Amino acid sequence: MTNLRIFFVGGLISYRALFNWLNPWIFVPTLVVGPIFQVLFFAYLGRAAGVESDRFYVIGNALQLAALPGLFAMTFTITGERYSQTLGPLLASPANRAVLFLGRALPVSANAAAVCVIAFVGGAVLLHVTLPAASLPALAVVIAATAVSCTGFGFLGGAIGLRIRDAIVLINLLDAALLIFCGVNIPLESLPDWMRAVGEALPVTHGLAAAREIADGATLGDVSHLLLAELAVGAAYAAVGYALLRYLEQAARRNASLETA
Amino acid sequence: MKTLRVIAVGWLIHFKIMSRSPFAIGVGATWPIVNATLAYFMYRAGGYPQTLLYASLGSAVAGIWSMAAIDASGAIQRQRWWGTLELLVGAPVPFALVLLPMAVAIASAGIYALATTLLWGRLVYGIPLPLEHAVAFVVAVPVTIASIGVLGFALGMTLVRFRTASHIGNSLEYPVWIASGLLFPLAVLPAWSHPISLALAPTWGMRALLHSALGGRAWLDIAICLGLAAAYTAFGIALLERFMDSARRHATLSLT
């Protein structure tokens, strides 16, 4: 029962604190306006470069935008505790760490999926991109899987935030890597082999491939291997991130470096 | 003379602060490389490799605007957090003279973006910087930075009532990149947006850099940049005076 309370109530409170108690003046500019304009920016760049259609950029950027909450919010769940001077008490508590961090990941995953949908709908409406109605339920499943996977990737950010005060710099670089390596705006076949190989090991790549196939008429069954690959990549990063969190927490206790990182 | 000293010292101090900021250096100097790389691959895939210098300079100007949009828009709020706002307002120099060099110094950190992007383009993709009008280029760089910094100042004054000004400023990063045609020509945008583009300093700063590098009417672009900077300054100061007057009358300087 205690674990359930930590998972749901702790996760919800952490999420509300993340957005200064759901202040719309932070939420709307960051997670509505910014994402829609990212879609528009790359769609116009694509038009000028003469590669791919608007649909390519709407799908690509909407899926990649799952990383915005996934990466940044998961990082802030740790660094935010340091800023509000609650990191020490949090880690001194006997709460189960897996439950503690997974509880924080749940609303972040939902948020990531919501940002995908917002960017998708906003971009599609403004650029007059249409998709077959029959593809939407399958697309929703792909968005959910990518959101979970990006949140798993975000565990790495949380761990980095435990050790490095300016983790946001590294997180920005991870976000940039997703834009470059995952086929978001550049067709994967245009990338050198080594870049494609890096993309295979990152979240978003497989989910994005699945979303594009579904938009072209594939069924959920046709892309199930891609969905499983996307979830497996996210789970692997979550496992590594969690192990790193535990290790760095213990290292911080040993070295008394929790607040000085 | 005193005014010039306030501006010069203010700029220097804040430029030093920015130069030691991990975010300004780590993110501000690397994101333009990311944008340049994306534009490089996209233009190459589309069969337009000759536009690489355009993408390189555009990414650098985009980086300068990012610094201004994120940091300059929240300049007053930051002073509030640091507990220095009341001291600055109470100082015997006009508050605008404190804020203006601050905004320009923030945009000046974009010089790192310009340097890394041009270096990256040269070393990784072999993009040359021709410099048809070298003198104009040397003048265009500080004028572009200053005019974008002053645009950040005007934006900051527009958002002065908002505690979340830097978040709102952050969301204006992509819209200005789009409207200024930094990585693609304005011709791909709808016609109704062109007047907005012409009112933005990054549009003319980008043109000044491009024309001075490749040849063209760079001095005219520089003059328009300066004119826009003057207009933004007047607009920002007018808003700041209203804000200061209101804050003094209602005793809300630290509460807004």
Image: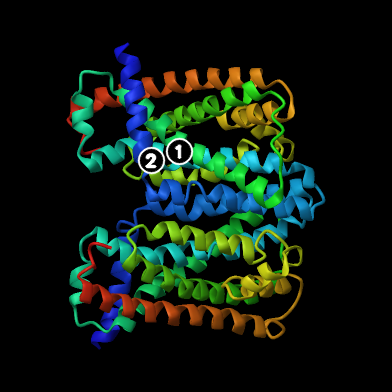
> A113 or B215: which is nearer to us?
B215
Name the residue tied to disc 1: B109
Of the residues shown, which amino acid type is indicated by label 2? Met
Under tag 1, what secondary structure?
loop
Residue A120, position as x, y percentages in the image = 60, 60
Q: Which mark is residue B26?
A: none
Of the two numbered discs 2 and 1 on the same chain, state the one appearing first in sequence.
2
User: Compared to B114, does A227 lie above or below?
Assistant: below
Q: Disc 2, disc 1: CB below 8 Å?
A: yes
Q: Which residue is mark 2?
A: B18
Subunit bearing disc 1? B
Q: How many marks?
A: 2
SS category of the residue bearing label 2: helix
Res. A42 in view: no
Which quadrant of the rendered structure holds the N terminus of chain A? bottom left
Q: Quadrant of residue A10?
A: bottom left
Q: Which chain does the numbered disc 2 sit on?
A: B
Asked whether, in this view, residue B29 is left or right of residue A18, the answer is right
**Residue nearest the observer in this picture, A235 or A39:** A235
In the rendered image, the residue lying farthest to the top is: B1
Q: Amino acid at mark 1?
A: Ala
Residue furthest bottom as drawn:
A1
- The location of residue B37, given as percent across then percent down, is 65, 53
Q: Is residue A76 above or below residue B204?
A: below
User: Can you say whether B89 is above or below A85 in the image?
Assistant: above
Judging from the image, the colouring scheme is: rainbow
Residue B161's x, y, as percent?
Answer: 32, 36
* Residue name at image x 45 percent, y 60 percent: A170
Q: Residue at x 18, y 24 (%)?
A: B90
The local crowd at label 1, few if under 14, some if 14 to 19, many if 20 or more residues have their Cα within 10 Å, is many
Judged left or right of residue B90, residue B228 is right
Q: Name the residue at 46% across, 31% down.
A: B149
